[in-house]
């Protein structure tokens, strides 16, 4: 980390980091979207005007504001305006529907809810009404506005909980993960320290800004003073024009993104699809060594993969300076201040980037051990050089395109289907998605035939988010079980259907 980035990294709050970066390079861009540009100076100035507008609506320090918005300049402005006020914000992934959204709003006690109106054919205002949301307002292209002169001083305490992120975890209901400005700053600094960008780089945000990776990535932009292209809806090859026009040098997101770039490159071998690209970077899902070598060979750039989770936005990260072997086979190294302990094969964590626990405090006792280490539920080991190798998961979570999917949630809904006698939902390896969702079903007596289409239609009717729908259906005479508690042996199913 260079001297300027190191100095900025001492900021106590996210808003303080915005102010310090804006003072250094006010005219340099931070976000690029189509033909629009937002500079660091404008992020500060417009962020204060939006904060004043929110203040006029009644938002104060500590007010809980949920937002479910696509990846846009306005979304970043709203988020930083809330940080300026010291509000508690609860980002919700845009693809979530009634079940997840209603739960998040009720559990967080959100007093306001920002939505995009109608986006990609879906009416978010109507959904908000259906789930009984309070203080609903549109924040797609027009944001609240006011005179910054009415604002109180910005918060100076970076250790108060001001963020509630949502993860499926291993239960059927989402879990509210509590973060502070300092924990998000620490996660972003880990990413920045590993990737070692320069002010000449151009990054990209192709994933939902409401993901924990949103602030993670933005902190890196603020520390090093370079911009990122925002993709409201990412799809290839349509997005390639923006990558080329803006001269993107750092791209990625997760293993699914790497596979998408490779697929495009294979359509025109020998002609770089993004001539300026020097680095792919991401995390959120397993990365097979074969994907690493294919990226280096075919895209002609480096690939640095990392390990993070909603509870800890950045745990380890590969660095372009790592050896080929470490980049291909490990998740990188932890930053200074992140302590990793392996207990009975499980990865446990302690450090400033670790969340402050869960909104439902009853979940904390099982999540942290007696020494205050977070139990990740992931299995792995550290190499002699300090690189982390992940070998599996204790928890029953499917990671599809970097998003956690609770198998128990899908199973609970499928058990309501009259044709389902019993069901096990598993994740199977997938070269494009990381994992795909597979439902293995025992038919109910007299239930008739089941098809993948009828199963997904039923789940849609139950309000399940699209990205959680099974992509494979297997019907079996009986699910394999152990001889004691008759628990389903999911590893047997993974071995049987994972080929």
Image (spheres, rainbow, N blue to C red):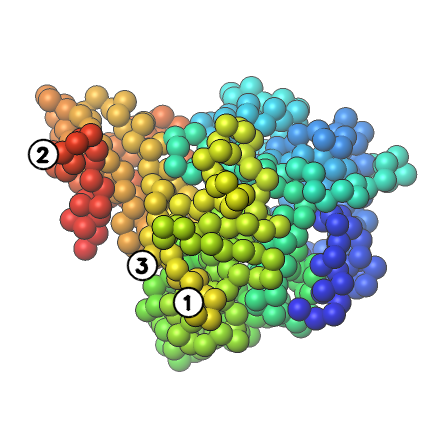
Q: Residues within 10 Å of mark 3 (few under 14, many from 20)?
A: some
Location of residue 162 in the rendering, given as x and y in whole percent from the top left corner: 67, 37
Using the image as rendered, state which of residue 361 and residue 70 is in the foreground: 361
Task: Please give left or right for residue 197 compared with residue 287 in the image.
Answer: right
Residue 163: which quarter of the image? Answer: top right
Identify residue for label 1: 383
Label 2 to label 1: alpha-carbon separation: 44 Å
Residue furthest out toward the bottom: 270
Label 1 to label 3: alpha-carbon separation: 26 Å
Location of residue 403 in the rendering, given as x and y in whole percent from the top left corner: 43, 46
Location of residue 133 in the rendering, given as x and y in whole percent from the top left corner: 58, 23
Q: How crowded is mark 1: few (under 14 residues within 10 Å), some or many (20 or more)?
A: few
Residue at left offset 46%, top offset 66%: 387
Residue at left offset 16%, top offset 36%: 482
Residue at left offset 32%, top offset 27%: 413
Eye-nearest disc, 2 or 1: 1
Task: Please give left or right for residue 71 compared with residue 345 in the image.
Answer: right
First in sequence, mark 2 or 1: give its number: 1
Task: Please give left or right for residue 3 compared with residue 284 in the image.
Answer: right
Label 2 to label 3: alpha-carbon separation: 29 Å
Question: Mark 2 touching mark 1, by CB under 8 A?
Answer: no
């Amino acid at each position: 980390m260079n001297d300027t980035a190191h100095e900025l990294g001492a900021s106590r709050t996210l808003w303080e980091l915005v102010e310090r970066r804006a003072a250094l390079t006010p005219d340099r861009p931070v976000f690029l979207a189509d033909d629009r540009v937002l500079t660091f100076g404008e992020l500060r100035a417009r962020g204060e005007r939006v904060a004043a507008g929110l203040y006029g609506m009644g938002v104060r320090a500590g007010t809980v504001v949920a937002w479910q918005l696509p990846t846009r300049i306005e979304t970043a402005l709203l988020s930083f305006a809330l940080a300026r006020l010291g509000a508690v914000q609860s980002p919700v992934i845009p693809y979530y529907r009634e079940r997840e959204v209603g739960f998040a709003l009720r559990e967080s006690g959100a007093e306001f809810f920002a939505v995009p109106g109608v986006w990609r054919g879906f009416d978010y205002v109507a959904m908000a009404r259906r789930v009984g949301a309070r203080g609903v307002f549109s924040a797609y292209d027009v944001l609240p506005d006011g005179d910054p002169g009415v604002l109180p001083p910005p918060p100076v305490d970076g250790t108060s909980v001001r963020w509630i992120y949502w993860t499926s975890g291993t239960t059927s209901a989402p879990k509210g993960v509590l973060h502070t400005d300092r924990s998000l700053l620490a996660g972003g600094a880990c990413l920045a320290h590993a990737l070692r960008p320069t002010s000449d780089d151009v990054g990209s945000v192709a994933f939902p800004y409401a993901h924990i990776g949103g602030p993670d990535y933005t902190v890196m932009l603020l520390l090093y003073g370079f911009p990122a292209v925002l993709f409201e809806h990412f799809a290839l090859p349509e997005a390639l024009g923006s990558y080329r026009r803006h001269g993107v040098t750092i791209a990625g997101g997760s293993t699914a993104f790497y596979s998408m770039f490779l697929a495009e490159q294979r359509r025109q071998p020998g002609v770089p699809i993004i001539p300026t690209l020097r680095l792919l970077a991401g995390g959120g899902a397993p990365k097979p060594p074969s994907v690493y070598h294919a990226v280096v060979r075919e895209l002609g750039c480096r690939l640095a993969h990392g390990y993070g989770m909603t509870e800890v936005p950045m745990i380890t990260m590969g660095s372009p300076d790592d050896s080929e072997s470490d980049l291909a086979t490990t998740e990188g190294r932890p930053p200074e201040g992140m302590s990793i302990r392996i207990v009975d094969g499980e990865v446990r964590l302690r450090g400033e980037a670790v969340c402050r626990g869960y909104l439902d405090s009853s979940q904390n006792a099982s999540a942290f051990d007696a020494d205050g280490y977070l139990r990740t539920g992931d299995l792995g080991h550290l190499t002699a050089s300090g690189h982390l190798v992940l070998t599996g998961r204790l928890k029953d979570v499917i990671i599809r395109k970097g998003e956690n999917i609770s198998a128990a949630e899908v199973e609970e809904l499928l058990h309501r289907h009259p044709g389902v006698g019993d069901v096990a939902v598993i994740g199977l390896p997938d070269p494009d998605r990381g994992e795909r969702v597979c439902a293995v079903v025992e038919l109910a007596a007299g239930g008739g035939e089941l098809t993948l289409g009828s199963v997904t239609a039923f789940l849609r009717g139950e309000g399940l988010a699209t990205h959680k729908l099974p992509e494979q259906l297997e019907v079996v005479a009986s699910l394999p079980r152990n001889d004691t508690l008759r628990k389903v042996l999911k590893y047997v199913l993974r071995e049987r259907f994972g080929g």
